[in-house]
Amino acid sequence: MPQQKMNMTTKILIWMGCGLIVGSLINAFASEVAFIQDYLVNGLFHVVGALFISALKMLVVPLVTFSLICGVCGIGDVNTLGRVGIKAFLLFMLTTALAITLAITVAVVVAPGEGFDMQTAEHAEFTAPAAPPLTQVIIDLVPTNPIAAYADGNMLQIIFFTILFAICVLMVGERGRSIAQGAEKLNDVMMEVVNVVMLVAPIGVFALMAKTFSLQGLGLILPMISYFGVVAVVLLLHMTGTLMILLKLLGRVSPLMFLKKMRTAQIFAFSTSSSNATIPVTLRSVEKRLGVDNSTASFVVPFGATINMDGTAIMQGVATVFIANVYGID
């Protein structure tokens, strides 16, 4: 009987666990060993992890560009595109609002940070960074130099310019068909590049986890266990509760089936802590495993990865309450 091939998700989980164990052991027993720190932690682990993250980010800009052009041109009608875009934007705003509401509610009830033992707390001052005005955020959506936006990896400006460009490709009709077809072929090539990068994903994830826990260890988590615990609980509630209810009501999709088929993207997001770096994996999972139409996925996934930051909203909501409790702010 032929031996069943291990899938990529299982490989990544195994290598992630190995990285956590190896890193924790180094932190506990070899944190003062110069050779291990210089050549393993800050050498091999650092280089492999950084190369892996760079490889993922290398894919993002060209993949988002070609995917958006394919998505917009695949929808084929500006009015239909507008309806899809508005629905996606409203859904993103709804889930973000629900995420921050849930985070603050749970944090207020649990009160993480109360009684936090921090010797310098009475001497420290917390100054929240000033948020840019809404007017500036809107102005910054439009790139003054598209080439600079691409060079800097400014995703909002890239998305704005690419969608505008793709809409104009639709508007010129038959003359733009060759551009749309070219973008589709380039998108296929980029998806193949994603497949190649995915071959080294388990090793990259191992290096990232090993370096993180080699430097920080489990000791980093223990003093802030209440904060991490509340964030984890809210993330779990939001993912298995809020999002799954919306998925069932609006998408008529089985939540269990969805979670199973999106495991690889979720593990990637966890290990890399980057929505943009996970875009290639998300696109592949959505199209190949969930069967979402390429035109819809190519438009919504890059758009959502850039503006739909539910996890960040949860983290900041809990952090606000945590910091207020630590510093005794009512």
Image: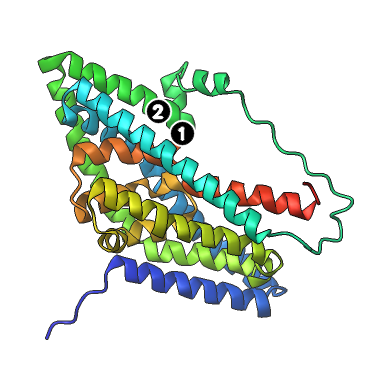
| Direction top: furthest residue | 172
Type of amino acid at the residue the image marks with label 1: Gly
Q: Are the residues flagged by discs 1 and 2 in contact, CB closer than 8 Å? A: yes
**Relative depth, front residue between 196 and 143:** 143
- Residue 100 numbered mark, or none: none
Residue 174: name its quadrant.
top left
14 vs 2, left or right, is: right
Q: Say what amino acid the circle numbered 2 marks.
A: Ile
Q: Residue visible at 26% across and 23% down?
A: 166
Q: In the image, is 195 to the left or to the right of 314? A: left
- Compared to 311, does 60 lie above or below? above
Element carrying mark 2:
helix
Q: Position of residue 121 (x, y in %)?
A: 84, 54
* Residue closest to the eye, 113 or 69: 113
Residue 10 locus on image (x, y percent) = 33, 71
Which residue in the protein does label 2 denote?
158
Question: At which x and y percent is residue 259?
Answer: 32, 61
Query: What kind of element bears circle 1?
Result: loop
Total number of numbered discs in the rendering: 2
In the rendered image, which quarter contains the N terminus?
bottom left
- Figure check: 22 above or below 283: below
Q: In the figure, residue 172 lies in which quadrant?
A: top left
- Observer able to see residue 104: yes
Judging from the image, the colouring scheme is rainbow
- x and y, in percent, of residue 222 in the image: 68, 70
The residue that mark 1 highlights is 153
Q: Is residue 5 above or below residue 315?
A: below
